[in-house]
């Protein structure tokens, strides 16, 4: 059963703890201010003191998107979101750089590369692919623990001159646990001692049967250094994406996930957000985790100011009241009052969790006391 201390209830009612103790005594209960009372007793006291009791459920205060599914006819294809994983020094960063170099837009815009935690490339055929720029298993698992499953496809990088190493195995296990399809990129094939076939054989021991071994996991030989095999890799990513029928409704208020966030000395809180569905626009009012704000400006991965961000697009958002956490969700709401209400409610919940004074539902129940 839910309980609250007499003092905590008194605070919420803006009454003296001693007065509540007195009232309880009259009701036949001998308690001190530090003792807890059950919900029924608390409700009785609230009415006794002439306050109006308003039951407030979390769904009234917070945003509930659980049942909010977009109708099939509103869904449009969206680019895949790819995470690169693999053992240290097997070439994750080099491959991310090389893939970024294949972007046809970067060339023509002459934009300066902005490291915002994710980037999007456009292929010669006009297809888009989003890469999370923060490789690492910790980021991947931490996001998943926070309920954020932003990755559609994992590219596992294995150096052909090395083999399956501890972090390779770890990446395989994480990917399997997440149920995310994998593509194996056998890197450093330019090296004379490279032995791609040995990698494929080793993968069998972990139940990964690549296409070259008549399995269904796509594999590709690349050299991040010599920039070979990159088009092949992108083609395989797009093929996998097509099989997955990745779709989202772009014509609705935006929802997204924070990829990374920081406090910029000059600009204030900055968050890189990946749009999950809807279109994020400058001027939109939002709640991000326990923070509220308004989109003052958005910057893409080429440093360009943009006014709109569509599904699977990573964008750096300026205008959030505080620094959110990686994995936090972003939701656009109708007005600032609503944004502040939701953010305040979540902040209160977070504080409660830290101090564990009273269960959340009681907290919400009495938060509406005037
Ligand atoms: P990470 O730790 O997985 O991010 O690996 P890096 O991208 O930092 O690469 C580790 C080292 O391997 C660096 O010295 C790279 O220059 C080198 N390297 C990466 N890719 C290749 C490749 O395709 N061929 C060769 N010969 N060296 C590579
Ligand atoms: Mg690296």
Image (cartoon, helix red, strand yellow):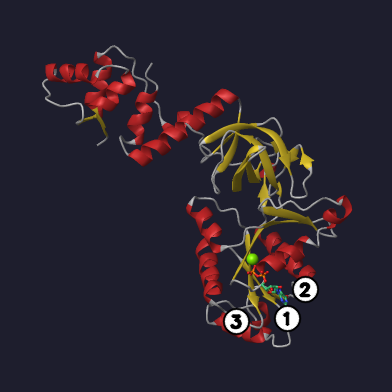
Residue visible at 71% across and 51% down in the picture: 78
Q: Which mark is residue 163?
A: 3
Which is more N-terminal, label 3 or label 1? Answer: 3
Residue located beneath label 1 in the image: 189
Is the residue 289 above or below the residue 25 in the image?
below
| View extreme (right): residue | 108
Crowd rating for badge 3 (residues with CA inside 10 Å; few <14, some 14–19, many 20+) = many
Image depth: mark 2 or mark 1 in front = 1
The percent position of residue 207, horizontal first and vertical second, equals 54, 77
Q: What element carries label 3?
A: loop
Nearer the observer, 79 or 103: 103
The CA span between labels 2 and 3 is 19 Å
Q: In which of the image's four quarters is ligand 1 placed? A: bottom right
Q: Is the CB of mark 2 within 8 Å of ligand 1? A: no
Nearer the observer, 343 or 217: 343
* 258 horizontally vs 355: left or right: right
Asked if residue 275 can be seen in this view, the reply is: no
Residue located beneath label 2 in the image: 229
* 7 horizontally vs 75: left or right: left
| View extreme (front): residue | 265
């Amino acid at each position: 059963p839910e309980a609250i201390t007499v003092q905590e209830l008194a605070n919420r009612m803006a009454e003296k703890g001693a007065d509540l103790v007195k009232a309880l005594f009259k009701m036949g209960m001998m308690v001190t201010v530090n003792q807890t009372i059950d919900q029924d007793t608390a409700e009785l006291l609230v009415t006794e003191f002439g306050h109006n009791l308003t039951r407030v459920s979390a769904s009234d205060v917070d945003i509930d998107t659980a049942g909010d599914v977009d109708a099939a006819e509103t869904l449009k294809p969206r680019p895949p979101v790819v995470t690169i994983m693999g053992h240290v020094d097997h070439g994750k960063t080099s491959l991310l750089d090389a893939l970024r170099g294949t972007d046809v837009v970067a060339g023509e815009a002459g934009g300066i590369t902005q490291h915002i935690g994710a980037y999007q490339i456009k292929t010669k055929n006009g297809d888009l692919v989003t890469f999370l720029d923060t490789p690492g298993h910790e980021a991947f698992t931490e996001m998943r623990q926070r309920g954020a499953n932003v990755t559609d496809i994992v590219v596992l990088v294995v150096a052909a001159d090395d083999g399956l190493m501890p972090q390779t195995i770890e990446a395989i296990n994480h990917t399997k646990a997440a149920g995310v399809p994998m593509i194996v990129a056998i890197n450093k094939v330019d090296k004379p001692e490279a032995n791609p076939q040995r990698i494929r054989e080793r993968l069998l021991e972990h139940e990964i049967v690549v296409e070259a071994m008549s399995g269904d996991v796509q594999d590709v030989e690349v050299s991040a250094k010599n920039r070979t095999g990159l088009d092949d890799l992108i083609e395989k990513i797009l093929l996998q994406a097509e099989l997955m029928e990745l779709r989202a409704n772009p014509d609705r208020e935006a929802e997204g996930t924070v990829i990374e966030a920081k406090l910029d000395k000059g600009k204030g809180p900055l968050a890189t957000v990946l749009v999950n569905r809807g279109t994020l626009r400058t001027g939109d009012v939002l709640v991000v985790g326990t923070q509220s704000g308004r989109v003052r400006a958005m910057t893409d991965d080429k440093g360009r100011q943009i006014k709109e961000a569509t599904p699977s697009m990573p964008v750096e958002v300026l205008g959030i009241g505080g620094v959110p956490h990686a994995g936090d969700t972003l939701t656009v709401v109708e007005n600032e009052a609503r944004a502040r209400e939701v953010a305040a409610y979540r902040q209160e919940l977070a504080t409660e969790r830290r101090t564990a004074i009273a269960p959340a539902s009681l907290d919400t129940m009495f938060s509406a006391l005037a």
